[in-house]
Amino acid sequence: MKVFRYLIIFFLILPNISEGSINDYIYPKSNYPSFSNSGTIGLIQMPSARMLPSGSIAFSWSDSDPYQRGSFVGQPFSWMEASYQYTDVNNALYSLVPEFSGDQTYKDKSFDVKFLLLKESEFIPAVAAGIRDMGGTGVFAAEYIVASKRVKNFDFSLGLGWGSFSNYGMSNPFNKIDDSFRERDVSSNITQGGEFTTGYWFSGKVGIFGGAEVFLPNMNGARLKLEYDSTDYESEGFPYGKDSFNLAFKSVRQPRSNFNFGLVFPVSDNLHLKMNYIKGHTISFGFSLKLNLGKKDPYIQKNDGPKLVQNSRAYKVVTSKSNTNLYKATLLNMNSRGYPLRSASLEDSTYKVVFSQSIHQSWPRASGRVLRILDAISPDDIDTFELGNINGGLGMYKLTVDRESFSDNESKNYYKLAARNIKTDPYDFVLENYEFQPTVKLPEFFWKVVPTVKTQFGGPDGFFFGNFRLSLITEIALKSNLSIKSQISVGVADNFSELTKNSDSILPHVRTDVVDYLKEGSGLTINFLQVDQFFKPLKNKNVYAKFTAGYVENMFGAVGGEILYRPFYSNFAIGAELWRAKQREFKQLFGFRDYETTTGHINFYYKEPRSKIIFSMKGGRFLAEDSGINFDFSRRFKSGLRMGVFFAKTDISEEEFGEGSFDKGWYFFMPIEAFFSNYSKGAAGFGLRPLTRDGAAYLKHSYNLWGVTEQSNYNNIARDWDSLYE
Amino acid sequence: MNKFSFLLILLCLSACQYISYNQLIPLVREATIGLPDIELSEDFISNQEFSFARVDLGKGANIIMVLHKIDGNFYTWISETGEKVVTYSGKVVRTEGLIHNIEIFNPDRFKIFSNAEHIGIFDVMLQDPQAFIQQDFSSKLKEGQEDLLILEENISIKVLSFDYTNLYWIEKKRGKVIRTKQFIHPKLPILSIDFIYKY
C-alpha cells in the first residue's frame, strides 16, 4: 500500500498542463533525455528506451556509494547507444595481492550497448533492448528490454531485466523458446575479462522495473524521477565483502526500499546536474555533459563568408589585356584568401588553375570560393574553369566548371543545379603543363605553437592522469612533395608522479612501458621528427605512395613506406605498408632502446555509402611480432565528427595477451570549427583502450595516405555540394 | 553548449590534434569575459552616416544596427549580417534573424507618456519555437537623472510564471527613447539597446 501512496502523491502534486507549442516554453529542454547512475540514458538506476540524437557524444559521472562511475557515451546511429564505463568500486582492493593494490580500490571497466527496436508513435511506446557490462568482468552484467512512452509532461518507462536487474525475479519468458534460457550460468564465462561473453545473455530469472521522468513546469527543464528498481543488490558488485570475493573488504548496505527518487536540473541543454535518493538510505549525485555534433554547424553559426573581390569590373578590364595580368591577379587574390595558387594556364576559353588549401573540411566550399574569385577577375570570354587541387604535391581532384551555370545559380544558392554542370574527375598534377608557375622560395618554413595535453584515462592508478604541454610544430618544405615535419613539446604541469604500474607483459614491451614513457617524457620530448616524401608511382592510376624516415611516434623511430590504390569513383581503397622500426628511449629525445623489428600490413578500406560507415582492416605483422588483423568501424557525420570502434585478433593466446584478452577500444574526432564562427580543418581527437597491452600494436605514423588522399575520391567531394556557395 | 565547456573538454581530451593559439586566445576571451563592447565614442558616432543602434544580447553578441526605415513610431533597424529589429517608441515589437524571434500584434498599446499607471495586455507570437502568449503589463514614468525620464514596464507572463521589468530611458527634450533594457523572448538574455539618432 505504501507503493500506491507514493504513486498517488507523486502524480497528484503535478499539474496537468495544456497542450500546444507553449509547452516548449513551459518544459524547456524536455526533448533531451537524462542519464542514469549507470552512465547511460535512463531513469535513476535503471535504463529507459530513450536515446540521444545521432552524432552525440557525452560524458557522465556519478557517485552512488559504493561506486563512483565515469562514462563516455557515443550515439553513432539514432538507433544505437554505445558506452564505456569506468567504475571505482570502493569496497574492494585493486587486486588479490594487497602489496600490489596498495590503497588502490577496485576499478571495473565495461562496455554497454542499447538498441532502439521500435520508434515511439502516438499510441506505441519506444522499445529498446540493451546489454550492460558486455565486455568486462561481468560484475555489473545485465540485459534488459524496456519501453518508454511520453504522455504530456510524464515520460513513463517499463522494462524486463535479466542478470543483476532480476531482483524478485519471475520465470523467463524466453524459456518457451529454448531451455538454455532457464539457467544463468556465469561461471563458464570467467576469463581474463574483456571478452564479449554471450552465453548467458537474457538467461535466468526476470525482474520488472519501471518509473517515470516528470518534467516540472516553468523550472527551466528540471525534472523529477521516480522508479521501481529491480537491481539485485545481492549479486551486483561485491555485496558481502570478503564473503563475495577475496579482494573485497567491506559489505555493502543492502536496500531498504526498491523505490528511488531523483531530481535532474539542466544547467543548459547539454549540462545536467542530478541528485537521487536510492535504496532507501543513500544519496547519490552526479552530472552529465553532452554534445550533439551530428549536424552541420551544430553550435555556432559561421560568419566567415567568402571575401568578395572588390572592383571586379576593373579587374576584368586589366586581366583581359594579357595572360600575365590574369595570372598575377589570380595569384594575388587567391593567396591573400588562403588558397595558394600553384600554377595556372589560359587555353582558349578555358582557364586552368591549380590550388591547395587547408582551411575547409568541405572541398566544394573551398572550390566554390576559388571559383568566385576566378569569376570576379577573369575576362568575360572565359567560359570554363578547370580547377585542380593538390595535396602533398600530388594531384587530388579536378573540377571542370561551366562558368555561366556557376554564376547564375550563386545568388539563389541553387547548388544542385550548379553541381550538375560541374564535372568531377581524378587529377594528375604535372607542373610543366601549366604556363604560369609562381616562384616558391624553397625551403619554405612553417611553424606554430600549440597547447597539447597528454592523457591517460582509466588506468589502475587512477581515473585521470594528464600532462599539459606546449608544442612547437614545424614543417620545412624542401619540395612540393618532400618535407621535414616535427613536433617538439615541453611539459608545463602533470600528475604523472602518481603513476606506478609497471608492465607485466610477456610479449616485447612495445606499448606496456607507457608509464615509463609518460613519466620520463614529462619534460622536453620530440614527439615526431620525420622526413616525408609523397609520390605517384604510376601515371593516371590513382596510386599514391609515401616514404617516411625518422622518429615517427613517441615510442618508435622507423624507416619505411606506404602505398595506396584508391580508385576515384569507388568506395574502397587497398594499400600496403612496410617499416623497419626501432624502439625509442623513454625520454623521447634522440636515443633508442635495443628492441627493433620489421612490421607491415595490407590495408583495406571500404565506405558504405548509405550508412556512411567506414570499415578498415589492417592485416599483417604487428610491432610485438604477432600476426593478425585489426578491424575498425567508424562513422563520419556532416559536422565532421567521426566516431569509431576497433578490435584486433592476432596469433597470440589470451594468456600471452594478458588482461583484456584482445586489443579493442573506441575513439572520436571532434571538429574544432563546430565551436567557432570561422571554418577550420582542425579536430580534437580522443581515443581510449580499456587496457594498454602489447599485442596487435601498430606503428602510428602521421600523414597516412588514407587521410592525405581524402579528397581524391568522388564521394568525399559530392557529399558536400550543399556548401558550394557558402 | 558554451565555449567554456568546450574549452574544458578540449583541454582534457585533446590527444591527437591541436588547437592553435590564434584560435585559443579569442576562445578563452569569449568564454570568460565575452566579446569586446563596441564603444560609443564621439569619434565612432561622428563617423556613422546614419542613425544607428548598438544592440547587446549578452556575451558575444554586440552589434550595430542601422536605421533602415521610419514609419510613424515604427523604426526598422538592420544589421550587416541580416538581423532585423523593429521598435515602436523604443520597444522591440518584431525581430527577424535572431536565434529566437518575436512579434507583438498590438504594439500600439505601448505608451511612453501616460499621466497615470498604464496597464494592458500585449498579444505576442514567439518564434523558434512558435507559441502564442499574452503579456500583462503595467508601466509607469519616473524622473531620471538630468534631462531623462525612466519608464518602468512590469510584465507578467502568467503561463510561464515569468515576471520581469523593462526599462526605457527617455530624453525629455526630444521625447525619444535613447536607451533600453528589455526582455524580448523567454529564451534570450536581456537585450540592451543604445539608440543614436542622427537627425
Image (tube, coloured by chain):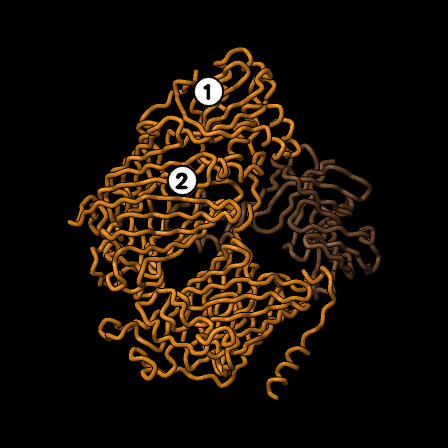
Chain colours: A orange, B brown
Question: For the residue labelled by badge 2, is the local secondary structure a helix, a strand or a loop?
Answer: strand
| Residue hosting label 1 | A344
Q: Which residue lies furthest to the top in this view?
A: A321
* Whether residue A141 is situated above or below residue A367 in the rendered picture: below
Labels 2, 1: front one: 2
Residue A253: mark: none
* Whether residue A397 is situated above or below residue A347 in the rendered picture: below
Query: Would residue A584 be found to the left or right of residue A422 on screen?
Result: left
Question: For the residue labelled by badge 1, is the local secondary structure a helix, a strand or a loop?
Answer: strand
Query: Would residue B182 be found to the left or right of residue A339 on screen?
Result: right
- Image point (50%, 13%), residue name: A323
Q: Where is residue A634 in the image (x, y as percent from the top left)?
A: 44, 50
Along the polypeptide, which appears first: circle 2 or circle 1?
A: 1
Tell which subunit mark 1 falls on: A
Residue A573: mark: 2
In the picture, which quadrant includes the N terminus of chain A?
Answer: bottom right
* Whether residue A690 is situated above or below residue A262 in the rendered picture: above
Q: Can residue B91 be seen in this view?
A: no
Tell which subunit mark 2 falls on: A
